[in-house]
Image: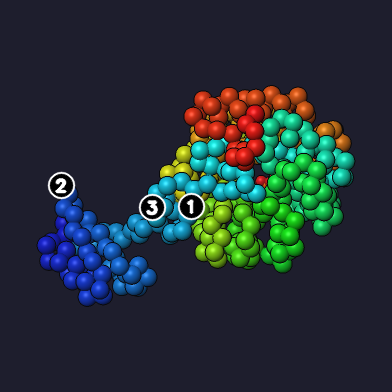
Amino acid sequence: MLPGATPEDVDAVVARVEDTGGQAFVSRGVSRVIIGLVGDVELFSRMDLAGMSGVGQVTRVSTEYKLVSREQHPDRSAVHVRGVPIGPESVTLIAGPCAVETPEQTLEAARMAEAAGATMLRGGAFKPRTSPYAFQGLGELGLKILADVREETGLPIVTEVVSAHEVAMVAEYADMLQIGTRNMQNFALLQAIGEARVPVLLKRGMNATIQEWLMAAEYVAQRGNLEIVLCERGIRTFETATRNTLDISAVPVVQRLSHLPVIVDPSHSGGHRDLVLPLSRAGIVAGADGVIVDVHPQPELARCDGAQALVREDLDQLAKTVADLTAYMGRRPGRRRYSSAG
Ligand code: PEP
Ligand code: MN
């Protein structure tokens, strides 16, 4: 209420709310009165409370993202991908090529990931590229290659899906469906993935606020799929020295607002391999539930994002750092429970 609101103004608001079956809780502060409303929010929003005498501001306090909100679900969730846990007690390392190019390249990258101790394989078969002339990915052939490499290595695969009508097909191969930064607000895609019974990796739109990101997650959850992991992958800022700016603050902020696990992608945010290790360190110490990185056996030949791909030695060093910082944070490596710890 405005500082000059009278007791009659307050009573009128309370009466109006109670007439609709709602409850009104009047809190009197030193300089103003706040009335908390509980009830049918849609009805409240149609009542034009803001236009009533003495009312200063009407603010919706209950979050709009209800299913992914921590308000509704105080314990942080774990998501399991073929038995591999992501959050909240574990820190999971996911590695693989930006794009699936050949069976040999994919298997070799997966072997690198496995040897370093990564427990999931990433790799794009459908690549949403800025330029229509750039390599668009191998499509379903790439998914078959990923499935073969999973047979060889046992690593669960996360791969991107770019259109709603391909969700069912990609889900036949993938263990986790990735929604890329460019599709974070492709609502038809979000809804289709919400109907799939496969865990989801939802990247933050490079121009999206945290609120918008959580609303995108809510779209997936609202259709019935709550197996969602969020991925901070860098946002657009005025800075041009890096590809995007990894928003480290997003990690603790999201964990306060939502029960969903959140991982970081230091490869797509920094855009250069030299940044992957320091950004990974920062992400884990900020509380991230995992790190997803690009690796390639021969980055100079990569058809996509070679500059950010780690080679074997880089990945080994990264994995060691991830393990050390996981212990430092009092967490454990994101491994299947029944496999030997390493
Ligand atoms: C990717 O992970 O391969 C990718 C395209 O990432 P982003 O959507 O974050 O650019
Ligand atoms: Mn990439």
Q: Dot 3 lies on which element?
A: loop
Q: Is residue 86 visible?
A: yes
Left-right relation of 116 to 303? left
Look at label 2 and name its amino acid: Val
Location of residue 132 in the rendering, given as x and y in whole percent from the top left corner: 81, 54
Give the residue displayed 87% in from the left and 45% down from the top: 102
Left-right relation of 63 to 28? right
**Which one is nearer the viewer's eye here, 87 or 154?**
154
Q: Which residue is mark 3?
A: 71
Q: Which residue is mark 1?
A: 211
Q: Are marks 2 and 3 in contact (CB under 8 Å)?
A: no
Q: Give the mark toward the camera: 3 or 1.
A: 3
**Which one is nearer the viewer's eye here, 45 or 250?**
250
Q: Dot 2 lies on which element?
A: loop
Q: Which residue is mark 2?
A: 30
Give the residue displayed 48% in from the left and 52% down from the top: 211
